Image (cartoon, rainbow, N blue to C red):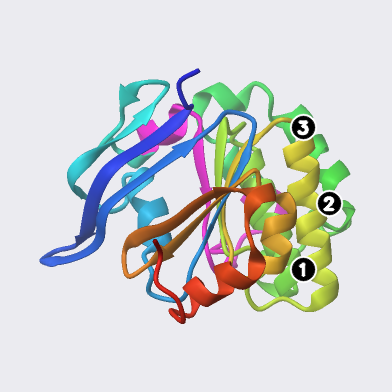
Amino acid sequence: MAPLLEIATLRAGYGAINILWNVSLTIAEGQTTVIVGPNGAGKTTLLRAIMGLVPVASGDIRLNGASIRNRATWDTVKDGLVMIPEGRMIFPDMTVEDNLMMGAFPPACRRNWKANRQMVFDLFPRLAQRHDQIAGTLSGGEAQMLAIGRGLMEQPRVCLIDEPSLGLAPVMVDEIFRIVEHLKAQGLTIVLVEQNTNRALKVADHVYLMQSGKVVLSERGDAVNLDRLHALYFAHEEAA
């Protein structure tokens, strides 16, 4: 079976600065693909290139076999690709509910906004309690819940989640990964970028390790040797 999302020999970057060097990944439908790597490895740039936020110089990005290379971001969202960005990036001066409604903006999502909002409130009861609260007054963990909830309002087919545990207290990290596990169990296709390798591997069907804009390891989640992964992660060992 062909992968749902395929990245083939991708090169991309910012202006004259190239960040990704012939990156290739395959994302299977209904699975959780984890991408790990140190800061500056190109993980966020890869997600941005998939979403059309960073121009692709060469290579291809295919969704269901059709190229979406350099497709406008708003059209990519219509295709079912949704990114939950690093650092939350909620609308701080709007209420929690208004932030969620921004996720329901695509025409295909508007007719289901009530059911989708209830689904988000069921996942995140705190958001239901704070629905009329200004988003900028939320805690970091609550803001991350809101960012995930806003993404789910867009009815994603593939959800790209960038560093969801960044800067959160351990109890909130537990809550965020509980939600990732729930979404995985529901059959959502997830691409998770995460530096907490121990937690990420517990939800991973497939793992990619990136270093300096390249993929240096690609293995099934249940086949990954954590010691070797960390040795490669910190460049104490070279990939074969």
**Residue 98 visible to an observer of this rendering:** no
- Disc 2 marks a residue whose amino acid type is Phe
Q: Is residue 16 left or right of residue 128?
A: left
Callout 1: 10 Å neighbours few (<14), some, many (20+)?
some
Residue displayed at 54% across by 49% down? 219
- Give x and y (percent) for residue 140: 70, 73
Q: Magenta stretch?
A: 74-99
59 over 46 or under it: above or below: above
Residues tagged 3 and 1 counted as in contact (Cβ below 8 A): no
User: What label does residue 173 carry, if any?
Assistant: 1
Residue displayed at 66% across by 34% down? 188
Instruction: Label 3, secondary structure: give it.
Output: loop
> Is 63 covered by the magenta stretch?
no
Give the mark nearest the N terminus, 2 or 1: 2
Outermost front residue = 240
Instruction: Label 2, secondary structure: give it.
Output: loop
Cα gap from disc 3 to disc 1, whole angstroms: 20 Å
Q: Is residue 117 left or right of residue 215?
A: right
- Give x and y (percent) for residue 89: 53, 64
The residue carrying mark 2 is 124
The residue carrying mark 3 is 186
Q: Is residue 74 left or right of residue 18?
A: right
> Is 85 covered by the magenta stretch?
yes
Callout 3: 10 Å neighbours few (<14), some, many (20+)?
few
